[in-house]
Amino acid sequence: MIKDLPYEERPRERLIKHGAQVLSNAELIAIIIGTGSKRESAITLAQRLIMEDRGLKFIIDSSVEKLAGIKGIGVAKAVKLKAAVELGRRMMLSTGSDSFTITSPEDVINLMMDEMRYLTKEHFKVIMLNVKNKVIAIETISIGSLNTSIVHPREVFKAAIERSSSSIILVHNHPSGDPTPSREDIEVTKRLVQGGNILGIKVLDHVIIGDGRGISLKEKGYYEFE
């Protein structure tokens, strides 16, 4: 049990003394759930929760009901875990785009990865930029498999015009985890680049987010953006 550990080795005390960055995933989860059970400590329970191939993604993907069904978790701990995940997501969104300047595809990938890598459906988003390439806003245009009927230039550029954007970057995820662009991805990009050229709102890139890695269509030469 945690109470049997030397005081300085307990998760909460280690966090206070050394900072959250030194704690393992299991220790951080143990702090969130607070207690274990009569037979296992909070750390052991946390280790079992993310054991083998589950990882943190298991917590992100699972519903409250699914987490609550795991022995030792229950509804109260499941709610705490899901609340922590959602709070982390909102904090990332609230700070990630604030005065954020896009200088490369890596900037886009770093900005959007945490939000989009675990989504179970394709989300098509538009990052709107000012003349200095600072992020004005990020808006979701559609949810579902990418095709030219769902991602219509009218919807994409309506948002950009309303925000007085100088340029935009297209972003969508591949739930499979493989960011390699499909033929439909390239066709949608071609159509939107042409629309942007007509409206005077340049499409700078189209970035596809996978699980832990992303691909820039411009960088890979899939389509000419100039």
Image: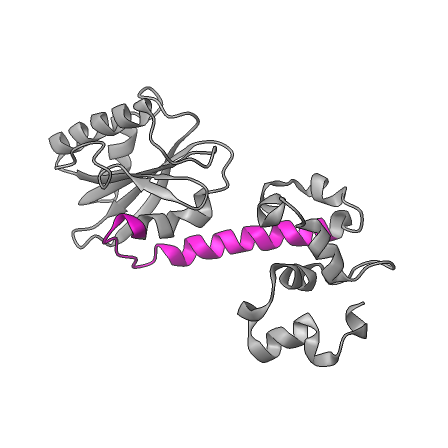
Q: Nearer the viewer, residue 14 or 140?
A: 14
- Tell me if residue 179 is in the magenta stretch: no
Q: Residue at x 69, y 76 (%)?
A: 9
Name which quarter of the figure residue 67 lies in.
top right
Q: Quadrant of residue 13?
A: bottom right
Rendered location of residue 172, percent (x, y):
37, 36
Q: Please tell me which residue lies in front, 68 or 186.
A: 186
For the point 21% across and 27% down, the residue is 190
Task: Say if 38 sits above or below 123 in the image.
Answer: below
| Range shown magenta | 77-106
Provide residue 35's location: percent of width, then percent of height. 77, 62
* Residue lying furthest front: 52
From the top left corner, tell me how far across and down residue 10 is, in percent: 70, 73
Marker count (numbered): 0
Is residue 95 a member of the stretch shown in magenta? Answer: yes
Residue 196 vs residue 189, the one in the foreground: 189
- The picture places residue 204, in percent across and down from the top left corner, at 20, 41
Which residue is drawn at the image coordinates 22% and 25% (left, top)? 191
In the image as oriented, which residue stretches furthest toward the top? Answer: 149
Q: Quadrant of the N terminus?
A: bottom right
Residue at 59% across, 41% down: 61
Side of 169 relative to 210 (left or right):
left
